[in-house]
Amino acid sequence: MAGKSISKGAMWVLMGLLIIGLGGFGVTNLSGHVRSIGSVGDAEIDVTTYARALQNEIRALEAQRGESLSFAEARAAGVDQQVLGQLVSRAALEHETARLGISVGDEVLRDEILSMSAFSGLDGSFDRESYAFALQQAGLNEAEFEANIRAETAATLLQAAAVAGIQAPPAYMDTMMTYLGERRSLAFATLDRSDLESGLPVPSEEDLRSYHQSHLPDFTTPETKSITYAWVTPEMIVDTVEVPEDALRRAYEDRSAEFNQPERRLVERLVYSDPERAENAKARLNDGVLFEMLVAERGLEMADVDMGDVSADDLGAAADTVFAADSGDVVGPVETSLGPALFRINGVLSAQVTSFDEAEPQLRETMARDRASRVIDTISEQVDDLLAGGATIEDVARETELALGTVDWHPDLAEGIAGYATFRNAAEAVREGDYPAVERMEDGGIFTLRLDGIDEPRILPLSDVREAVRAGWREGATAEALATQIAPQLEDLRNGASFADLGLEATEITDMTRRDYRADAPPEFIERVFAMEEGEVQVIEGEGRIFVLRLDSIAPPAEEDEEMNRLRNALRDQVASDLGQDIFQILANDIRARAGVELDQSALNAVHANFN
């Protein structure tokens, strides 16, 4: 049974490659003279299999990113090496299974092929013509396909045997769960400037100079790029775009269902098999039985009977009865296409009528923005031609609708054009001497930019940041004074005195774990708590305040904690999977080392050429 399951998994891997082939791919001529891109021992890596797998990974990456990718971008992301590595590992297993004599019998092979839905006829059973046609479309013959299945299944059996029975070591799991689930109970008090028993001294000039020198990163400007740019967005030209009234009226007619909606009802419908059962249910409702109880008796959920908001046209013969009722009423039984039904009305939505004059501003804005975007498409071509002809950005701004601007850009800037992610990315990447290019922004606008110079980071003198230095010194001095003030009382806390005994208002926390978060504590709070010993007292200095905390108790992970049990199971599976992958990689590396790997770069180049 296990072997059959593994075999089925391998079949679907191959079926995935077959389905990709059925989608059509422009490398069908690759097999004319070059049949493989390389080999591991006696196992060849078919050129078409590599091409299809490469296309599949590129499509997956495009779906993940939500945008099309050039082959150069896919290669930059390492897609070709990833696919090649996977196929080399698979070929290594196929070589080893052939060496060991592991194979799949004809009966198992036959059963699996017969069970594949891709080869089924209209009646759902295996159809030989469908089988032959599908393989023909994929560029395979029956012998090749069946040989692939045998090899893939045998390789899967070998891989499964290598990683079978792998489990996460119990000691490792116990250590990890203790780390994640250990509970600590504590109390802490926060003191700020209002708790100081004496005022702060006035900082001297030496104090300010010392603070400035010891916090130089806080008073250092970032690297700044001086950038000249030209840009235009739909918003910038929307007022110049004319939208004829006849186009507005056509748009209004096209969207009439949006602007003019009939009266609707929020309705639930409970259908019965015959009128007698429906009448009995209605009588019980009249006697005080809840509609929800009738639904539950039928083994249904409320979501099963909820029709949402419906119009009279949606209800057919039941429309008059339902639309004559008020919100909260249950009406029926009413005969429907599904049988006699009870209807509960949960709300009444009045008809919505929006005249053309009322809809016109919204329509005009939408259509103007759409037309502005199309205008920008035309402008983009014009700008591209100007830049290609040697025009400067200033020339572009004079001859087109683009607005000229300059900015001293750094990574923290997010105002104006720097609020666009595409501009920030381009500003980050631009180098001196780069050729200006047209870039598209998120809202449909375009821009082009030029780097004029780079200002290196520099330390701001004390005279320029005196107030910021004074504020920083004051916060540090406040925390230091509070720590000095509380120091004599810390020993009392260690000896068992409560925070209340010392006149401090404390927050008590029970069963904190490393996975908790405290918005009212400094970032290092959790880390410090779990580095403390039971009964220990510590002070954490913050910005203008301090945190006094005492660890009261340490407890092991809770035994009956469903979340911890789910976490343990997930972690155990993840560790076992990671160990299995490591072992499989060791096996594949060993096979490759013994069998030898040969790759045909010219064949790889031929495949890659089909993607360019």
Image: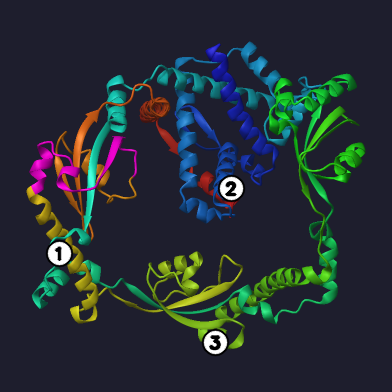
Q: Which residue is mark 3?
A: 395
Q: Residues within 10 Å of mark 2 (few under 14, many from 20)?
A: few
Whole-percent x and y of residue 483? Answer: 13, 55
Marks 3 and 1 in Cβ contact (< 8 Å): no
Marks 2 and 3 in Cβ contact (< 8 Å): no
Position of residue 543 relative to residue 337, above or below, is below
- The amino acid beneath tag 3 is Asp
Whole-percent x and y of residue 183? Answer: 28, 31
Nearer to us of marks 2 and 3 is 2
Q: Which residue is mark 2?
A: 63
Q: Residue at x 63, y 27 (%)?
A: 144
| Among the two numbered marks 3 and 1 on one chain, the one whose residue lies closer to the N terminus | 3
Q: Is residue 159 magenta?
A: no
Distance (Cα) linking label 3 and label 1: 56 Å
- In this orientation, which residue lies closer to the viewer: 62 or 310? 310
Q: In the structure shown, which secondary structural element does the residue marked by tag 2 occupy?
A: helix
Residue 477 — which label?
1
Q: Residue at x 17, y 62 (%)?
A: 478
Q: Is residue 513 magenta?
A: yes
- The amino acid beneath tag 2 is Ala
